[in-house]
Every structure is written in C-alpha cells, then in structure tokens.
Image (tube, rainbow, N blue to C red):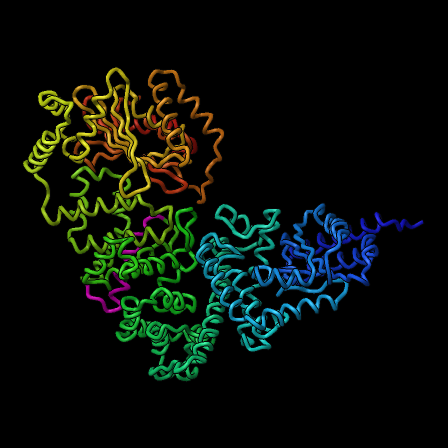
Amino acid sequence: MIDTSPHNLYADVSLALKNGRAQLIEKLLAGKAPDFLDDNARLIDDYFRQRYEKSIVGPKMDIAKNPYAVVALGGYGRAEQCVYSDVDLLFLFEKKVPRVAEDLVREIVYPLWDMGLDVGHATRSIKECVSMARKDFEVLTSILDARFICGMSPLFMKLMDQIRSKFINLKPDTVISWLVETNRERHRRFGDSSYLLEPNFKEGQGGLRDYHTMLWIAKIKSGIKQRRDLEYYGYFSNDDFTRLSDALAFIWDVRNRFHLMMNRKSDQIHLEQQRKLAEVMGIKAVNGHLPVEHLLGELHGHMEFVKQQHEMFLYEMEQKKRLKRKNKGLKTTRVKGLKFNRGMLNFISPEKILNNPGLLIDIFAESAAQRAPLNSEAKRLVKDFAHLVDEAFRRDPTAVQQFERILIRSSRAFEVLNQMLYTGFLARFIPEFKSVVNRIQFDQYHLYPVARHLLYTIKILRGFDTDARAEADALAHSLYKELKKKKVLLWAALLHDIGKGEPKSGHSERGAVLVEKILLEKGASPADAKTVAFLVEHHLLLVLTATRRDINDEETAIAMARVIKKAEVLKMLYLLTVADSMATGPKAWNDWTASLLENLFFKVLNIFENGELATGRAVKTVEKKRQAVVDALPPEMAPDQLERLLSFMSPRYMLYTPVGNIPKHLQLFAKIGDRPFVWHVEKSPGADTRTVTICAKDRPGLISRIAGVFTLNNIDILDVQIFTWRNNIALDVFEVNPPPDPIFEDERWERACRNLEDALADRLDLGGNLNRKKNDATPIQPYTAERPTEIVVDNKTSSFFTIVEVVTFDFPGLLFRVTDALFKCGLDIWVAKIATKVDQVVDVFYVRDFDGQKVDAPQQVAAVKAAIQDILPGEDPIHG
C-alpha cells in the first residue's frame, strides 16, 4: 500500500532535491556539468513547484481572493546558482500578506534549512515591493533579476510592469548613477581582483558584481531578460560575448570548486588555500610555473577581461551621454591608421598594421594622450599581430621614445601599461617581462603577482608628482619634483623585480644584469644603464638597513654612503624604496617603516652634504649637548648633581640621544629611588607607535624579562636602544606597537607594569606563562614550501659590536627566549631591532661580551648559534 500522507510526500520531495544535487555535484567534480548553475537552479525550482502542488497551507489561503506567487530573486533568479550560494525567495501577494503566510514559509523553506541550504525569503505585497524598491536600490536590483517559479504568473507580470512603469522608466539615470557609484565604492573596498593575490570572485574589481552591474544597466535601459540578450541588443559583439561567457564559466567553476573544498559559501581565496584548490582542480605545472600560478594566472586573465569589458561598457555609456550634450562631438585622432569607434581607439584595418607595425605602440601612446581606452577589437588585433614586435621593433628609437613618453609624461601610465600587459605587447617589447607575468610570491607581504606589482610601483611613483600627494608624502613629492632623470628612476621601477622570473634567491643581482642589457638594447647611454642596474641591484638596501641595523650608529650611514656614492642616486633609491614598499602592501609599509626610512635617508644625505663625522666633531656634538642640558636644568636638580649625573652617561648615550630627551631621562631617574624601575609611555611623533622609556637598576637578563612581559601583554617590540650609565643604571628606550585594544590601553600598561615588577622580583614565571601562551596561540602557517631558520653572526659591519641576526617563524615568547639565550652566552645587548617578513620575524641584536669585546672567536660564534638554535622549533638552520 502506498503511503500518500503529506509528511511522506514532502519527504520524497526533499529527498529528490538532495539526491539530485548530490548527483549534479558528482558530475561537476568529474568535469561533466557544463550547465551546473542552471541545472542546480532548476532542481530547486522543481522542489518549490512540487511543494506548491502538495501544499497543505496553500488551499487555506483563499488564492482566488488574494493570489500569490513564488518568485526567485538575485543569483537564483538569474539561474546562476553556485553550490552554496544563497537561495533568495519572494512570496509575492497581490494584496496584504495574510498571517497564514508564515505557515506557508515554514512548510516550504524549513526543509531547505534542514538540508543545509542558505535560504533568504521575504513575504510582501506588490505595493510593498514597489515602495521598497524606490527607497532601497538593493531591493530593486534583486527584483531586476526576478524569475517566476510557481503560483499565479499574472501576479509576477504585474509586479515587473509596475516596477518599470512607476519607477525605472521615470528615473533610469538615477538608478544607473547609483549602480556606477556603488561599484566604484566596492572596487575601493575590495580592490582589483584581476591581479590581487587573494582575489574576491564576487565583490572585487573584475569579479561577478562587475558582470551583474552591466546586466542590471542593460535591463534598465533596454529591458533585456537574460545574459544572452547582451549580444542581441548590441551591448557586446559576438566575439566579446563568447569570451565573456568563457570568463564567467571559469570564474564560476573555480567558485564552485572552492565552495566544495571549504564546505561552505566563500568568495575570497586566501594564500594558504590556493595550492590545495589547484590540486583539487587537477591543474598541472605549465612552462615552469607551479600549478597554483597557472590557476591564478588563468583566473586573473578572465577577471581582467570582465574588468575591461565593464570599464568599456561604462565608458561607452558615458560617451553616448557626452554626444547628447551641447557642442560635444566625437573624439578624433591625427595618427594615420587609427580611428575612434564610439569613443574608443581602434585600428582602421589589419592591413594598416601590416604596412606599419609602429601602430602597435602608437595606439597605446594615443590612448595615453587622448585618455581613451582601446576597444575590444583593437586589443584582439594587438594580440594577433604581436609577432611583429621583433628585435628590430624593440630597438627602434621611435618605438622606444613612444614607450618612454608613456612611462614618463602620461598621467595614465599605469592604465596604458596595464593594457600593454593584458594584450601581451609588454612581454613582446620587453621579452624578459614574460617570466614574471604570472609569477607569484607566496607570502602575505605581496598583494600582487610580480608583473602587476611592477606596474603598481610605477603608478605610485607617478603619483608623487601630483599635488594630491604633496601633503601625504611631502618628502617623496619634493624629491620627485626636483629629480633631473626621472626616466632612469621609472625604468628601474618598471624592472626592479625582473630577476624574479627565476624562482630562486638573488633576484636583485640577477635583475641588475638583465636590466643593463635591456637598457643598452633600447639605446640608453652606458651611464644611465649602469645607474638603472645599480638601483635594481640595491632596491632593498635602504629598507633592510633601516629595519635591521642601528641607524643611530654613524657607521651605518657611512656604509650606505660608500655604497651609494651620489646624492642624486640616493634620492632615486629612496623614492624607489618607498614606491616598492607601498606597492607591496600595507604589511610592508607603515608609519614605523616610513619613519625609519626617512631618518636613514637624511642621515646618509647629511654624509654627502657635510662629509663623514670625525672624532673631533663627535666630541663637539657631545659638548654642545651637555651645555644644552645644563641650560635646561630641571629646577629641582642642583648644578653639581647634574654634573655628576652627566659624568655617568656614556659617550654613546650622549652622542645618539636627542638633546630634548636627556632632561626627560634625568627626571625619570630622579623618580626611581628604591624601586627596581620606572617607566614613561608616550605616543611616538609621526607614527602610530609608543615609545616606552625604562629607567632601571641594571641587572643580568633585564632585557629578556622586559621582552617577556611585553609579549605576555600582546605588545609587539619594533626597536630597542639600550644604554648603561656608569652608576649601574640602565636607560632602555623601546619602540612598540600599542596594545591591541585602544579603549583599555591604559589598563593594559598598568597590568604590564605590575607584571614587570613581579618578573624582576621572581614572583612571575615568565617562561611558563609564555609557554602556555604559545600553546594557546593559533600557529602561523608558512606560505612557501620550506623557508628555514637563519642564524647569522656578523663581525664585519660594525667596528665595535657583533651583530646577531635570527630569521625564523614567529611565536609568542620568541624575543624573550632569544634575548635570554644571548644573556646565558655572556652577552650584553646594546641595540635590538625587530623586523618582520609577515610569516617570519627578523630579530637583530648588537652585542658585546661582558668584558666589552666583540664575539669573534670561532668557538664563541658556534656557541651563540647553538644556544639560539636550542630554543627555536623546527629543522636545522642555515648558518652565516
């Protein structure tokens, strides 16, 4: 006997959907579901229709008096239903929504929630829908995508007619302007996913929302019903529509596979997930590129196409508006062989390119000059005729001059270079560029693949020339304005990472050899080629020195000056360093790094302008400071007491401490009394960091205990200056990031102070507490295959100190353990700098033994390395 009870009928409907989706997903994974999105949506449609037919609640609603319909909205309405996409639903009523509608929702929607589908639903009357669409354009766009599923179809048609007649037809430009501005804001928020290393499939520039925006605008302007109509109504050529469909199909396939891999809806693919996704998708290594690089390269290429189509769509729409305005005509060009089509550049014919290959660079130069993009056909022709960019073309002075004009003079250099990259022209004009086009660096430092990073560096450098950057980057703005050879700097910026085409260390040196050859082939003078090569070889010199060496040590600035040799080269190197760091991303460029770099720049510039400081000048500097401190004598301090305290201060302290800070340090010392330490915390000028000045009675292991307490309180140390006075007082100046919660910052400092008091009195087990913190912390996953620990003991850079560098993966308590290990080796720390490589940390220490000597005996060096290695996790380190 067949059980026809409603419960079993519903169970059968739900089971049919569940089994149907499981089979469809199996086909997707096997690569046999080309229409997955539409098929998935139809399965869900069938569920709703069967539920509607077998509904218990429906007949109670008096459908004749108050008819209703079930309507799909959003992505479900477009029948673009990814694996874990939301199922957006509208229960549409002609008149008021009856109370029993809640029972209808419960009957239809709840089983889908039980199945794990994310269903969003609304119950509204036609009047309510129209009213809400007027007030909230997000509601309007969801209705633009609406599709009838079941119920009373005339009701659905009535809604769509009213939406168009009562609102869209009356204010189309208002809605379109909102869509365009919303898109711009979204791009600012999510970035350009066509080349971000962690792209957002949906919201980023080049993502699905760009396609949705074009679709919505076409629906508003022309009333199109489906994606195919974009071609029928003339918005896309057949070729462009085919390529758009291919691009969307790839993005959707990656999105679906990613949904399944994550077992949930997710639209941004992070670095740590990308290798696994490439493996899941069965992507193989191609032309020396890793599978993940091939995956992201193809994804970026398709998203770039969507982005450019979106930009051209909006540009063409704006051109049509322009023609309607008074006295506004079409753009024209004087370049023979080129023409404008609907405001965009194109070649007159393919034959013109064959007769004059120079048009391939001329069209980009004209694009820069006229601020007009190439249309789709022009881009296709550049790709098709790229083989004409041969060695003779690359060396042709006219072509090189056109390229340099774009690089140096055009305010649209980035956009034009990006079009060159997309069409393949750039890699033909500079063949060495090909190896970095999809080259990816697996760390969280870099936001972009190498080639895009190079273009972004150009964009930032050119931005220094604008008045808009004058306030934000005053030094960079003034240096760039004064620069005589901008061409040399811009070539260096464009090529500074060209050596990364080979995925191994030494890219700067390798790149220097390549760029000198490239520049000479382009007809540059030998002097300019050597300068560009120097900038490329040393483009990391300033930032590594600023973050890893004691920039208050005169030897540091002197060493830099001896390498750089000329003030003009220093200025170019500084500008390149700033632009490179900013283009890398926010984790490579912050207020603290900027402050260090600017400080180092001025110190090296001072060497060029005034020469190296001699001992006599150093003595005079100290004497001037002593006199300035005497003149600013605190009222509570007697002159003889001040003189005695000044005699306790080391020459190094007097030489490197700003004169305005010395009275503050004396006031701090006056408060210490019988206490083990006193400290003062203040906001650092020019950076969102804190300066913590600690005046303490010196004792063995003081620095490691302070470091441990800061770590315990989530306070990251950036830099330490350590001074010991001759009266057994330690004056230590820490530069730190503020505690994580700004609201309770004062309370956290008070707690840290109590912790330090307990640690110095041996009431706090720092090692045990830090071990527990380490075990509780989320481990930092490395993004490269294997990046081992490095321990370097350097006795060459400084005349007076041994420099110990420790490069390893970070964990809570690392600094405490390293400083404690150095102390147990009988070493005094005089300067400490903590730099980061995001997933790795670089701790740098200037040390001497307890007798004031460098650590240069082989057995001492080996003992230091062994002691540090013992406290680090992981495999054997690289020693240097």
Query: Is there any visible trace of residue 484 in the rendered image?
Result: yes
On whether residue 739 falls in the magenta region, the answer is no
Q: Which residue corresponds to the image point at 71% horizontal and 66% vertical from the top-left?
A: 156
Magenta span: helix, strand or loop, mainly? helix
Can you say which quadrant of the picture contains the C terminus? top left
Residue 345 as seen in the image, left or right of residue 858: right
Residue 381 in the image: state x and y as whole percent.
Answer: 44, 76
Q: State the count of labels.
A: 0
Q: Nearer the viewer, residue 512 or 760?
A: 760
Residue 738 as seen in the image, left or right of residue 84: left
Magenta-colored span: 505-526
Q: Is residue 608 above or below residue 618?
A: below
Residue 279 in the image: state x and y as whole percent.
Answer: 55, 50
Which residue reaches farthest right? Answer: 1
Q: Which residue corresponds to the image point at 21% horizontal and 56% vertical from the top-left?
A: 479
Residue 415 found in image quarter: bottom left
Residue 377 as seen in the image, left or right of residue 461: right
Residue 288 found in image quarter: bottom left
Residue 595 in the image: state x and y as whole percent.
Answer: 26, 44
Q: Which residue corresponds to the image point at 81% horizontal and 56% vertical from the top-left?
A: 61
Q: Nearer the viewer, residue 654 or 808?
A: 654
Residue 386 in the image: state x and y as whole percent.
Answer: 41, 73
Q: Nearer the viewer, residue 20 or 518?
A: 20
